[in-house]
Image (cartoon, helix red, strand yellow):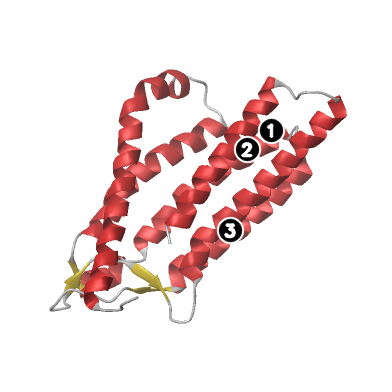
Amino acid sequence: MSDSPETAQHFIFITQLVFVAFYAIVAWDWITSFNREWRYIWKAAWTPVKAAYLFCRYWVLAVGCFLLYCFVNDHSLELCLKIYKIPVALAMWNQLGSEVVLLIRTYAFFNRNVYLLSFLITCLSGLIAYQLYVATSQMELLPFIKPPHTRGPCLPVSRPHAAHLLGFFMAPLAYDTIVTVITVGKAIMIRRRRGGPSSMLIQTFIREGVFYYILISIANLASP
């Protein structure tokens, strides 16, 4: 594959299109489903799940505009050096919100097992610590490609001979894999113990959990 400036600029342009497309999908989904969200979420009693859901929902809408500002527009080198780490640091909190929702669901599914809760909180704390480490110290600004190389998008890259930016997105995938495996394992144990088809609630929980896992895995794999 050619490493020419034209090729590099092409891939930067594709990356920018992906960010714009992702934000357009999020905005479209919010607009088209707001009536149901208002009926089933906003009017419902406040719970930890509701708070985590709304944080996930609106944090990405709020910070997405800033991400597009950093990644799609051209800026001076001085400005990029000040702000290029900020989008990654902001994005990690949206991932955290979705992981908290998953944690609460799994905790409830395991009948509020405190040992499982402690294990999941420990894993999530490790995930947060690693992502903060990457966001604060393991990234560099992608050099400007377009002549005269004085302006460009503020895109971060991993430091030379490191892949921590890839790890930033793979770490949540590892956490989701752990949660999905233990949840499916629990469902199989329940079904075997009962000696027949599992309840509709368990089937729905597993179906939605696996569907979420597939979607979030695709997002995490596509992000790097």
Look at label 1 and name its amino acid: Ala
Residue at 35% over, 75% down? 1
Q: Earlier in the sequence, mark 2 or mark 3?
A: 2
Q: Label 3, label 1: how many angstroms apart (C-alpha)?
A: 21 Å
Question: From this viewpoint, which residue is outermost toward the left?
Answer: 148
How many marks do you count on the picture?
Answer: 3
Seen in the image, is 42 located left or right of residue 196? left
Where residue 35 sits, quadrant-wise, is: top left
Say which mark, if any, is on residue 25: none
* Label 2 residue SS: helix
Using the rendered image of the protein, determine whether residue 181 is visible from the camera's viewpoint.
Answer: yes
* Mark 2–mark 1 CB contact (< 8 Å): yes
Q: Which residue is mark 3?
A: 127
Q: Label 2, label 3: how many angstroms apart (C-alpha)?
A: 16 Å
Mark 2, Cα crowd under 10 Å, few <14 / some 14-19 / many 20+, is some
Look at label 3 and name its amino acid: Leu
Q: Position of residue 38 (x, y in %)?
A: 39, 21
Q: Position of residue 177 (x, y in %)?
A: 63, 50
Seen in the image, is 192 located left or right of residue 7? right
Question: From this viewpoint, which residue is outermost toward the front?
Answer: 1
Residue at 35% over, 32% down? 30
Q: Which residue is mark 1?
A: 108
Vertical order, 106 against 140 (above or below): above
Q: Earlier in the sequence, mark 3 or mark 1?
A: 1
Mark 1, Cα crowd under 10 Å, few <14 / some 14-19 / many 20+, is few
Q: Which residue is mark 2?
A: 104
- Assign the C terminus to one quadrant of the image: bottom left
Using the rendered image of the protein, determine whether residue 154 is visible from the camera's viewpoint.
Answer: no
Mark 3, Cα crowd under 10 Å, few <14 / some 14-19 / many 20+, is some
Q: Position of residue 14 (x, y in %)?
A: 28, 59
Vertical order, 148 against 39 (above or below): below
